[in-house]
Structure formats: C-alpha cells, structure tokens
Amino acid sequence: MKITIWSFMVILLTGCGTQSRNPFLVEWNTPFGTPPFNEIGNEHFMPAYKEAMIAHRVEIEDILKNAEAPTFKNTIEAYEKSGKLLDTVDRVFSCLNGADTNPELQAISEEVEPLLTKHYDDILLNSDLFTRVRTIYEQRENLGLNEEESTLLENIYKDFVRSGADLDEKDKEALRAINEELSTLYVKFRKNHLDQTNAIALVIENESDLAGLPETLIAGAAETAENRGLEGKWVITLQKPSFEPFLQYSEKRTLREKVYKGYINRGNNGDEYDNKAVVSRIAALRVKRSRLLGYGTYADFVLERNMAKKPENVFGFLHDLWKPALERAKTEAAEMQAIIDREGGNFKLSGWDWWYYAEKLKKEKYALEDSMLRPYFKMENVRQGAFSVAEKLYGIKFIRRDDIQVYDPDIEVFEVQEADGKHLGIFYSDYFPRDGKRAGAWSNSLRSQSNMDGNYITPLVFNVGNFSKPTENKPALLSTDEVGTLFHELGHALNSLFGDTVYYGSRRTPRDFVELPSQIMENWAMDPEVLPTYAVHFETNEPIPQELIAKIQKASLFNQGFRTVEYLAASFLDMDWHSLREPEGVDTANFEAKSMDGIGLMEEIASRYQSTNFAHIFSDGGYSAGYYSYIWAEVLDADAFQAFKEAGLFNRELAGSFREHVLSRGSTDMMAQYVKFRGAEPKVDALLLRRGLK
C-alpha cells in the first residue's frame, strides 16, 4: 500500500488528542485548497512545524534507502517533491508573521528559526545525499534531460555546494554554528525593526500644529489617536502613508524634523530596539560563512547566481549612474533653497525640508501637487485599472471571491482565470497598514505552481502594501507613488500566477532579474492612454482631465535626482557591507558614515535606508548584496516597455512573447530569455532618459 504524506500524518497523529485537529495536518476542504485562516490559530504552528520536519526527514530517508543507482527520477525529482507539508506551514506562517504579527507569532519565530536552520543544514550537509546528487550532475550530459530538467538539476546541485556539502566535517560544524546564529539575529533584527517603527510616533495636541496638513491626513491622524486611547489628539506614525505626507505639507519645521529623524534613526537610538550590534554581527558572520565556502566576500557568493556575476560589475554600474544623479539632485536642492531664501526662511535646506519644498517647487513649476491627484486615485479604481491592464495584455480575468477565508477583514480575494475560463490561481490583496504589519510592500505566494506527475498545482499569491487608509468620510485615496507600487506588486503576482513549469525548483530567477516583471507594470500606471480608464474622481466619477494628465507627464522627471540618489546611496551601502573581507565586527555607525562619505552623499539627502533599519538586507529578505537589483532591472524594463510603445501598448502578440519567455519560465541564463523576447540585450540609454539623467 502506498503511504502518502497525508496518510502518514494521519497515522502519526492517531490518538494524539487535540493535535489531531491541527488544520495543517489534514487536507483542506476549501475552495482551490486555500488556507483555512478561520481555523488556524497561533497554537497550531509549532506542532505543525515539528510534524512537518519529521515527515520531511522521512522523505529524505526514503531517497537514501533506495538501493537502485541514483537517477534523475529517484533522487532529483524525489528531492523536489519532498518537504511540501513543511513548505505549506512555513509559507502561511511567514505570511502572517510579516503582515499580521503579534507577540505569540514573534515568539514562535524565535523558537522555530534555529530549528529550521538545523533541519535544512542536516539535509544540505548530508554527505550521502550529496553523493547521489553529484553522481547525477556529473552524468548530466548523457541523461537526455530536457531544458527544464537540466535547470532543476543545476539549481539543486548548486544549492548543495553553496550550502557547504563539499566541506570537511570540521568546516561543516563551523558552518552550522554560523547559520544557527544568523537565524536568531535575523529574527532579532526584524522584531526590533517592527517594534521601533510602531513605538515611535508624533503626538500632536495643539490644533495649530496641524497647519498645512491635508484633511485626509488630519482625519487619519485623529483616528489613529483615538485607536490608541488619545481621543482629541492627532498621531503621526512612521508608516509611509502617515509620515510622508506630513513631511510634504506640515508648515511646522521643528515637527518635520522630529518625524524625519524618528524615521531615519529607527534601530539606532541606543534603546532596547537598537540594531547596531545586530547589523555588525550579521555582516561579520556573512564574511566567515563566505570564506568557509571559498568566496572572498559575501557579495562574491551572492552575485555568482545573479546576472551581475561580480561585485565590480555592480559598483561600476552604480558609479555610472551616481555622477549624473548627484548633479541633478544638487540642482534640485538649489531650486528649493531659492524658495527658502525668497520666503525669508534664513536657514539652509535640510533633509526634513526636502519633501516640503519639493512639493512647493512642483506646484510652482508645474501647477501640480499631490492633493490635486489623490481624489482620482481611489484604491479600488486603481486596483481595477491594474487588473484591466493585465486583462488587455494577457486575456485573463479577475473574479471577486467572497467564499475564501482571509486573515484580516481588509483583505480581498480574486480568482484569476484565462480568457477561456481555465483557473490560473488565487490573488489576495492586503493594502492597508496595521500595527502587526511590517513596513513596505511585497508580493509572495502561499503556494507555487508546479505540475509533477500530471498533478497540476495552481498558485496562491498575495500582495501586501501600506497604502493610505480610508477614513470615516473618504475612501482610500492613493498618492501617485502608491499607485505605482500597486501596479508594481501586481507585476510580481502575475510572474507567480503565470508559472508554467513542471518543477517549481526550476524557476530560481536571479535576484537582479526578478524586479523586471514588477517594474514594467509601473509603465502602464501613468501612461496617458491608460490613466483615463481608471483615474476617476471618487465623488463625481469624472475621468481625470487631460490638463492634469499633461501636467503629470511634464512633471515625470521632477525630483528624479533625489529619488535616484537616495536609492543609489542605499545600494552602495548594501554593497559596502557585503564587500567586507575581514570577519570582524565593525562599528556600524562609523562604517555607514564612511560608506556615505566615500560616494560624496550630499547632507540634504539621507540614504533611503540606514543600516539599522535596512530590512531588505539584514532581515534575510533576499536582497543582501542585491539591493541594486531594482535599478539594474529598470534598465531591462525601460527597454522592454519601449517594445510595447513601438508595437502598441496592448499588443497581444508581444505580451504573449513576454509571458512565455520572461514571466512563465525560469532559466539559469535569464538574459538569454530576455533576448528571446526583445531580440537583443538592453542598453542603459532608455533608463537615463526616463530619469532625466541624460
């Protein structure tokens, strides 16, 4: 009798009392196998994790016990099939811990991270298992593998080698210790980052201190205060929809300074949430780990699998952009200083002034300000606009589903279908801030597409944001940045939804390519042809007037010096941290200051992130030695969108080619995939023109 993973769990749990009711350990009788969030409690995670790790070990043991010679099917494919229950538990937990966490989930994270690290080290450092994998890899030219099978084999083999499978036992033990310590540090960084973001806020008691603020921000700040038991006051938080418009519009310079410094100093206040020592230790351990694995730096280790390949290629690329961006930013600063002087300000432009005077400058130069545009960007309309772009390009449909369980009432769910009604996957949107949600926006999957043994698994994808919330009197009205972010994250979702592979493990997209599917979607968001189709006034339902569209186009290059400089500064900071060669801790503040001085960062602009709150690179978010990826991919997306401008914004044949070669499949050489779509490698010119740097 064949024992499946599910029947194995039933046997294992027979007579185990309340654990038998653990929703993770029974098959889900839900639409499309979606997680039964209403049934999942915090108490279910640790038992589920532990049982899933046991099940995974059994599956690995079955591979090792196979007396037959290693083959692609009995080793590589069997390895790819293993650990599915553990993957399910971990994806659901990661979703909740990122988007709706609480002290219990954070405690579980602290407990389970070292267990997971040990679990995967036990597998990837298993000499017998690696011997089987290596045997197949060395025979790969004679096995008659197709392109996808070859990619899967290549990925798995490199996973083992890059995880230390080739090391001797002494070095393996050293690597295990490093991995275990890193896992606990990542948890600590994330917790400090979230807790400090939530802990710092500006409480306004005098109505006069609201001068200049838009009504929507005032209403939101009053609601936040009321929720915190501060009725009659106003609270500005460090969530982007709160602090950014405050910096844009507040006439109170001293209050702008408090909010600005509160934001950039997160994790750097010498209190219980301080991340300086955590950052320094993570960087040192990454150097040690890289050296054990035979790499000079952590950047060398990471970039081996990226399109950039080498640190010098990244630094060269960043420096090529830095000089024109800095020159542009200095021009912008001079224009704002002129406004200050003209108004008799008698002070020098500082970081907390930039947003405020940039808004004034935009109004002066283009007769345009953010408050004129927000009424046309009701969240639901923007989301439908993004859906419509995807529908016109790829012939798909988004159908609202109210029968699928969610983890918070703000979340909405859509079934995604092909034009002929074939089910593609499920899309969850979770767009508004909450105290349990980390900052930023992201896309991820609760389940990924695969098609092993004819068992077609469809993806479950979610987009998370921290957009401007609705108030008692107004719906959620987004800024133009938030509009771009919504389109961006849907691009990531489409990349996941369009997966069309047998093996999920064959879609290991390089980090510096992964932003192409998301960033190209942003091009449609503000296109003059697209804007009137979704940007309608929330009160009158009138489409955005052509006059405003023209102003948006004219202002498209506005503040690009600032945007590029703050981003590039963070990219340099990331690369500097991960180009360290000595495995000794450094003083975090001094290191960061030296890094920024080294590129000549102007004092009026701060790096987009500081080391102590740079979650992309220090919370194991996947962007360490890779934050440059956004602008690297922008070279690709600017070039790719040019193809649509030439052929037609909604050219279905071109979109089909993009879906086939870029969105649906993985490859160890994604530039080759891009060339199949575009016909040639991209050049940086389109990016420089788009940002007004040429």
Image (cartoon, rainbow, N blue to C red):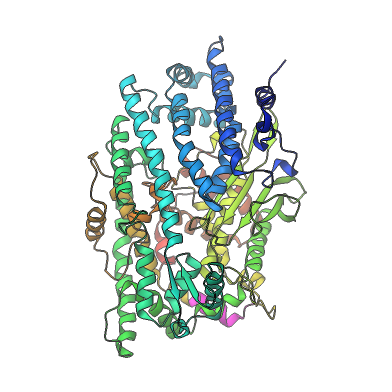
Where residue 41 sits in the image (x, y, percent)? 63, 44
268 inside magenta stretch: no
Residue 573 can be seen, yes or no: yes
Q: Quadrant of residue 23?
A: top right
Q: Is residue 550 magenta?
A: yes
Q: Quadrant of the C terminus?
A: bottom left
Q: Nearer the viewer, residue 217 or 361?
A: 217
The range drawn in magenta is 544-554
Residue at image position (34%, 23%) is 167
Left or right: 625 with respect to 34?
left
Question: 95 and 674: which one is in front?
Answer: 95
Query: Residue 396: x and y, percent?
Result: 70, 53
Residue at 64% of width from left, 53% of height from top? 428
The reply, left or right, for residue 235 in relation to residue 503 is left
Q: Is residue 194 left or right of residue 59?
A: left
Secondary structure that dominates the magenta span: helix
How many labels were placed on the picture? 0
In terms of image quadrants, where is residue 195?
A: bottom left
Q: Residue at x 45, y 16 (%)?
A: 128
The quarter of the rendered structure image containing the N terminus is top right
Question: Horizontal placement of 547 versus 161: left or right?
Answer: right
Can you say whether 422 is above or below 467 in the image? Answer: above
Q: Position of residue 88 (x, y in %)?
A: 60, 37
User: Residue 312 at x, y = what percent?
Assistant: 29, 46
Q: Is residue 257 above or below residue 570?
A: below
> Is residue 218 or residue 678 the one in the foreground?
218
Q: Residue at x 44, y 34 (%)?
A: 114
Relative to residue 604, is residue 611 depicted above or below? above
Q: Say if residue 503 shows up in the picture.
A: no
Which residue lies most toward the top here?
A: 67
